[in-house]
Image (tube, rainbow, N blue to C red):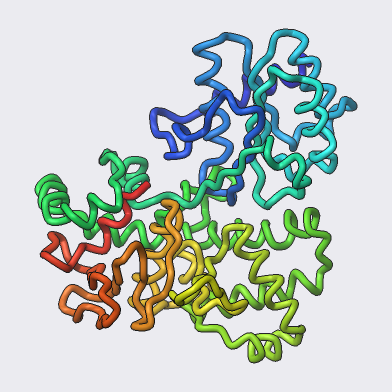
Amino acid sequence: MDFFQERDQQYRQQVPGDFRRFLFSKLNPDDRCSVVYVLNGTGKTTLLLQLAEYHQQIEPDLSLFISADDLWLHEQSLFDIAENFYLNGGRHLLIDDLHKYPEHERDINRILDRLPDLHTICSSIAKLPFTNARSKDIGSFSLPPLSFREYLEYREAIRIDPKKLGEVVSFQKEFSEGISGLFQPIPPFRRYLAAGTLFPPDNKNALMTGTQYGERRVNDLLETSLPSIEGLDYRSVTKIKQLLALILHNGPLKPNISDIARYINVSRDSVYSWLSLLEHTGLIFRIWRRRTGNTQHRKPDIILPSDPSMLQFAGNSPQPHAVQMTFLISQLQNAGFDCNIHKSGAVYLNGMTIGVGDKNDPLPEVSDGSHPLLAADNLEVGTKDRIPLWIFGLLY
């Protein structure tokens, strides 16, 4: 136990200053078990360390941070460590990279069954296969890339409180006027889109650009972590990378599943399965057209990356519309909204049809009674139906 307590103190010395991801305030420390699903580079380790430090200040010596990277160094199982900690008064256990521990399901189940007052928060970069019977005891959360609002606070030292979507739509002129009176939002917005969605590379990757670091973290997920969790072989991983590259180079992609299957030489069922897997890992969004009734087609109407900076992987130069659409949908989806695609090609959400484009582009054409709006790039202050694109980055 002393080994992990010493490591805990070493890790806590790396906790950064006051900046906290939006999820910090949404995790309930009294829940029995929560798993945060997240990609590397979005601050998962920092989040858990900040939670450990928060509990330490309230109840000294009742929290413990463990990295699964350290478990192989010790003969005890994760449950044995948790039980020892619990019997010595511990109440808050934080486990980073749980997916790296092969017996995670067995030991988390034993913790829930035998240690009733121990509260556990874990991180994983891929969905873990807990049984349906146990899933009601385990809360699932996602930690997406930094929003534009979080980027402003972390990189530019500009703090803005998150806005509700209704506020953004109804009071966007007042919000944008107030913010533009403090600073020009468009220059930092350009920096954010280029390489601001992730935390800066650590010392090990310090010589990488933001885009190179983004490519590295996706490669690590697809080549190392995902095969160990999903049991994928080398051929399947190669095909999944081809599929993702196709999406990035053509996003937002209007998929023809048969053509994609022929292109990467696999079955249509494999394409559908891997698209689902890529979405569950947080790399893409599948968006369907708005349709009447409860029918949802198997094939999504568009597929796009979950992070606009991914469009620049491998030296790609994306079209402005691709970046604009990817940014808008990513910010809305990450804030908890389910987007659809309107027949006009715009985003449909809560009775609004939101097109993207430059500030002088026309509003989307609608005939279904929805409210047409334009999320306008290169617009600092909004007008009646034209909302600055950057302001949608303040939702979380």
Which residue is at the front of the view, 104 or 367? 367
Relative placement, left or right, of 331 versus 100 is left
Residue 25, by quadrant, is top left
Residue 181: give x, y in percent of width and height: 9, 48
- State the residue lying farthest toward the front: 293
Q: Quadrant of residue 323?
A: bottom left
Q: Quadrant of residue 189?
A: bottom left
Q: Position of residue 163 (x, y in %)?
A: 28, 46
Question: Relative to residue 374, is residue 181 depicted above or below?
Answer: above
Q: How many marks?
A: 0
Determine the residue positioned at 50% across, 12% down: 58
Is 214 situated left or right of 159 in this image?
right
* Of 234 and 14, the residue lying toward us: 234
Residue 82 position, x and y percent, is: 77, 22
Give 199 or 372, whichever is nearer the viewer: 372
Residue located at (48% from left, 58% from top): 209
Q: Residue at x 41, y 68 (%)?
A: 326
Q: Position of residue 359 (x, y in %)?
A: 18, 73
Q: Is residue 297 left or right of residue 154?
A: right
